[in-house]
Amino acid sequence: MKCRNWQVMRRTPRRDNWPRGKFPGVISLWWSILKKNVLLFLPTVPLAILLQGSGPSAVAAEGDTFTPYVFASMTHDSNLLRLNGAATTSSTADTLRQAGAGLNADWKISRQQILLTAAVNENRFDRFSALNYRGRDLHGTWNWRFAEHFSGDIGYSNNLAIGSFAYQQALVSNLRVQERSFVDGFWSFHPNWQVGVGASRNKLSYPDVTQRFLNREENVWETVAQYLSSTDNKVGIKLRETNGTYPNQPVDFVNMLDSGYLQREVLAFIDWKDGAHNELQGQAGTVQRRHEHFSARDYSDINARGTYSWLASSEVTVNVSGWREIWAYDDLATSYSRNRGLALEPRWMPYSTLTISARFQHEQADFLGDPGILPFMTTRRDTIVTRNFAITYEPAPRYSFKMSIGDDKRDSNESIFSYYSRIASVSATLQL
C-alpha cells in the first residue's frame, strides 16, 4: 500500500559483500548492520534534548536497558515446499537449523524514548541447501514527545528472511527483504480527544532475479481522529490512502497485469478494556482499489478484523480473533481473494516458569474478481486449517526454552493447490 514519503530509503547491502564464515561472520555482520541501519537513529537524541530545552540535565534514566542475547532453533517440516498430496514424498521434508545473536535496547532521555532491536541469524537446511541464507531483523523507533500535547513516532525496520512456500510451491530462493520507514504525530487538543497524521513507506523486494517481478512498493498517508476515555480506552476513525507500484512488472495488456494502483480505506476502530478481564480490539470499514490501466481488476468491499481477550485469571487467557478481509492477489485468473477466518488462542501459565499455549485457526479464501481473461474458469476456493501447540519454559529470567508441534493443511477445489504439512520445532534463548 502506498503514498509519498519524504524519507530516503537506505540501500540494502549486497549479500555477496557481507562477511564470510560461520559465527565469526555473524558477529561481524551484526556489527556492520548495526552501524549502518540502527545507529542512524542516535543523532535524533541531541535533537530531542533541544526540543525539550533540557540541556545537560537530560541524561539516560536509571531504568534504561541494553540486552544482548543469543538463540538457536531446529525446525522439521514434513512438506517444506507445500506441494500437493500427489507430489508429496519423504523427499519434500527438511530440517532447518538456525543460530543467531541480537540485542534489545530501551533508552529514555528526558521525555524521549529510543527503542532499538537488532538480530542476525544463520540458517541451514539439511536437504535443500540451496535455500541456506543469512537473515537479519532490525527495528529502530524514536517515541518523541514535545510539550504536553504533541507526541508521535519515527522509525525504520528491515527484515531479511525466507518466505512461505504456500503460494510458490517450487524450489526457489524465496528470500525477501521487507523494509518500512514511518513517521506520525498526534495533537491532544482536549483531555479526551486526539488527532493525528502519519506517513509510511513499505518496500518488499526479492534478491533472486527470477522473483523480482514480485517487488512491490507502497506509500501510505493516514489521518486519525480518536476519543480517549479516562481509562485509556480508544474509539475513532481512520482514513488511509495507499499508492502502490510494481517497479519490475510492465503493463501487460494481454493478461491485464497492472503496474500500479490507488487504494482508499475508511476504518472505524476500537481499543477497549472492560475492567480487568475483558479486552476488545478491532477495526472495520470500506476499502476501494483502483488500478491505473485496467478497471476490470478494481474492487470495493468491506474489511473487518477484531480480537476479544478474556483474562480469566492471572494464569489463564483466551484470545478469539475473527476477520473478513479483501486481499490483493494478482494472477491470470483473479485480482483479489476474500478471506474469512476465526482463530482461538488459549494460554495457561500454571507456574511462573511454565507457559502452555495453543492456536487453532480456520480460514476460507474465495478468489474473486475474475476479470474475464480465462473463460469458463471455476472460482477457486481454499480452506486453510492450522493447529499449533507450544510449551515455553523459563527457569530464570535470562534463559528460555520452547518446544512446539503443529500442522498446516490447505484444501482447494483446484487440487494442485492442496497440501498438508506437519511441523515440529525446539528453540532456546540466552540473555548475556
Image: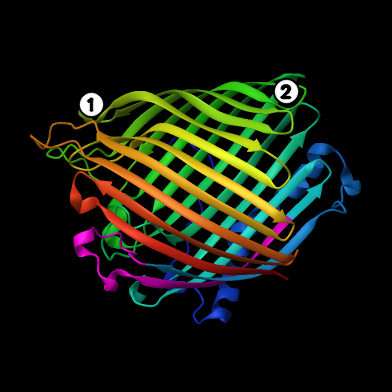
* Residue 342, label in figure: none
Residue 356: which quarter of the image? Answer: bottom right
**Which residue is found at the position 19% from the left and 50% from the top?**
415
Could you tell me residue 390's position as x and y percent? 55, 58
Location of the N terminus by quadrant is: top left
**Percent x, y for residue 424?**
46, 65
Asked if the residue under mark 1 is in contact with the one under mark 2, i.e. CB atoms within 8 Å, the reply is no
Residue 110, compared with residue 290, is above or below; it is below
- The residue beneath circle 2 is 188
Work out whether residue 349 or residue 175 is closer to the camera in this orientation and state it.
349
Q: Confirm whether the magenta stretch covers residue 115.
A: no
Q: Please, what is the three-letter code of the amino acid marked with disc 1?
A: Ser
Quarter-of-image position of residue 316: top right
Q: Nearer the viewer, residue 380 or 25?
A: 380
Is there any visible trace of residue 132 in the rendered image?
Answer: no
Mark 2 residue crowding within 10 angstroms, few (<14) / some (14–19) / many (20+) = some
Q: Name the residue at the right extreme.
A: 57
The range drawn in magenta is 78-105
